[in-house]
C-alpha cells in the first residue's frame, strides 16, 4: 500500500505493535484530545474530527483492500479518531485527569466489546466500518460521562 496511506492508517507504524495496538492508538488519541483538541475552539475541534474521519476512512479503506482483511489490527487511526473525538465533544473532562482516565477506560471497553449497534456499524463497507464503530464508542463514552455528570450535579 502507498506509504502515506499506510502511515496514516497505522499511525506511523504504531499499529504494528505486537501488543495492544488498539490501546496504543487510543492513547495517542487521548494525548491529542487532552493536549490539543480540548483547549481548542469548537470550530477547530469539529473541523479536526470531521477532517480526520474522512482521511481515516480513506486510509483505512486502502489498508483493508491491500491487506485483504476486514478491520486489520494494524489499522489504529480509528482508535485515535474515536478517543480524540471524546474530548472534542466534551472538552471539560480534559481538565480532570481522573475524568479523562475514566473516558479512556470507557472508550476502550466500548471499542473492545462493541455493544449494539457498534457491531452493526462495523459491518459498513471498507473504511467506514472501521471508523464508524469507534465513533459509536465515542458516543457511548460521552453518553455515560454526560449522565454521570448530570447525576453528580
Image (cartoon, grey):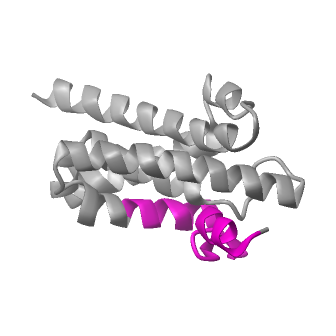
Residue 72 visible in the picture: no
Which of 96 and 118 lies nearest the eye of the viewer?
Answer: 118
**Residue with the most extreme left position:** 153
Name the quadrant containing residue 116. Answer: top right
> Where is 123 relative to 32, above or below?
above
Q: Quadrant of the C terminus?
A: top left
- The percent coordinates of residue 48 (x first, y second) are 36, 51
Give the side of residue 117 with respect to residue 91, left or right.
right
Name the quadrant containing residue 121. Answer: top right
- The percent coordinates of residue 113 (x first, y second) are 63, 39
Which of 93 and 88 lies nearest the eye of the viewer?
Answer: 88
Identified at 71% across, 65% down, the residue is 74
Give the side of residue 52 with respect to residue 92, left or right.
right
Decide whether residue 4 is among the magenta residues.
Answer: yes
Decide whether residue 21 is among the magenta residues.
Answer: yes
Name the quadrant containing residue 10. Answer: bottom right
> Where is 18 relative to 102, above or below?
below
Identified at 72% across, 30% down, the residue is 124
> Where is 3 relative to 147, above or below?
below
Q: Main secondary structure of the magenta part?
A: helix
- The percent coordinates of residue 33 (x first, y second) are 32, 58
Q: Which residues are magenta?
A: 2-30
Tally of numbered discs: 0
Which of 73 and 13 lies nearest the eye of the viewer?
Answer: 13
Give the side of residue 84 with respect to residue 128, left or right.
left
Give the side of residue 108 with respect to residue 94, left or right.
right
- The percent coordinates of residue 75 (x first, y second) are 68, 60
**Residue with the most extreme right position:** 68
Residue 22 visible in the picture: yes
Amino acid at each position: 500500500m502507498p506509504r502515506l496511506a499506510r502511515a496514516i492508517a497505522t499511525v506511523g507504524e504504531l499499529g504494528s505493535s505486537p501488543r495492544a495496538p488498539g490501546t496504543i492508538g487510543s492513547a495517542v488519541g487521548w494525548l491529542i484530545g487532552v493536549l490539543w483538541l480540548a483547549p481548542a475552539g469548537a470550530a477547530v475541534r469539529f473541523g479536526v474530527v470531521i477532517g480526520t474521519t474522512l482521511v481515516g476512512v480513506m486510509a483505512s479503506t486502502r489498508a483493508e483492500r491491500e491487506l485483504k482483511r476486514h478491520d486489520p489490527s494494524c489499522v489504529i487511526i480509528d482508535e485515535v479518531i474515536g478517543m480524540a473525538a471524546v474530548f472534542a465533544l466534551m472538552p471539560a473532562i480534559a481538565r480532570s485527569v481522573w475524568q479523562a482516565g475514566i473516558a479512556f477506560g470507557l472508550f476502550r471497553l466500548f471499542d473492545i466489546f462493541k455493544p449494539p449497534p457498534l457491531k452493526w456499524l462495523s459491518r459498513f463497507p471498507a473504511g467506514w466500518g472501521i471508523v464508524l464503530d469507534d465513533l459509536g464508542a465515542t458516543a457511548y463514552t460521552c453518553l455515560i460521562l454526560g449522565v454521570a455528570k448530570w447525576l453528580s450535579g
